């Protein structure tokens, strides 16, 4: 379900339906956090995807928070 919803959110983003993409990436992020935890690389990827949607909507503060967290997770997982 999480993978399918992630794919749908990606299509919504590419189609310019940013409100639906935000809703669905937010749901995917909650699922990934429950499945794999906050430190998993796939969780970081969804954070990054959600941040991109938020940037398109000019929601800069929450996008920045997600991007910084995503970078932090990626750095930890590469070490």
Image: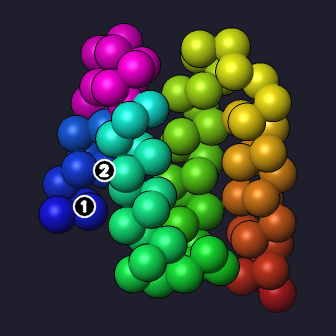
Q: Nearer the viewer, residue 50 or 62?
A: 62
Classify 10 Å Cα crowding around label 1: few (below 14), some (14-19), many (20 and above): few
Q: Work out whether residue 41 can be spotted.
A: yes
Location of the C terminus (image quadrant): bottom right
Image position, residue 56 (x, y; %): 59, 16
* Residue contact between numbered discs 1 and 2, judged by CB atoms under 8 Å: yes
User: Dominant secondary structure of the magenta stretch?
Assistant: helix
Q: Is residue 67 above or below residue 19?
A: below
Residue 35 left/right relative to 45: left
Q: Which mark is residue 68?
A: none
Residue 33 left/right relative to 71: left
Q: Nearer the viewer, residue 32 or 42?
A: 32
- Residue at 54% over, 81% down: 37
Q: Is residue 40 above or below residue 49?
A: below
- Residue at 43% over, 78% down: 34
Give the distance between the C-alpha atoms of the residues marked 1 and 2, in whole angstroms. 5 Å
- Give the mark count: 2
- Residue at 71% over, 35% down: 63
Q: Is residue 16 magenta-colored? A: yes
Image position, residue 53 (x, y; %): 53, 27
Image position, residue 2 (x, y; %): 26, 62
Colour scheme of the rendered structure: rainbow
Q: Is residue 41 magenta-colored? A: no
Q: Which residue is mark 1?
A: 3
- Residue at 55% over, 57% down: 45
The magenta stretch spans which residues? 11-21
Q: Work out whether residue 42 can be spotted.
A: no
Q: Which residue is mark 2?
A: 6
Q: Secondary structure at mark 2?
A: helix
Classify 10 Å Cα crowding around label 2: few (below 14), some (14-19), many (20 and above): many
Image position, residue 21 (x, y; %): 37, 30
């Amino acid at each position: 379900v999480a993978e399918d919803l992630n794919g749908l959110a990606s299509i919504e983003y590419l189609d310019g339906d940013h409100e639906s993409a935000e809703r669905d990436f937010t749901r995917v992020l909650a699922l990934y956090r429950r499945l794999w935890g906050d430190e998993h690389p796939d969780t970081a990827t969804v954070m990054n995807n959600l941040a991109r949607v938020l940037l398109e909507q000019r929601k800069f503060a929450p996008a920045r928070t997600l991007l910084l967290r995503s970078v932090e997770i990626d750095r930890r997982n590469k070490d």
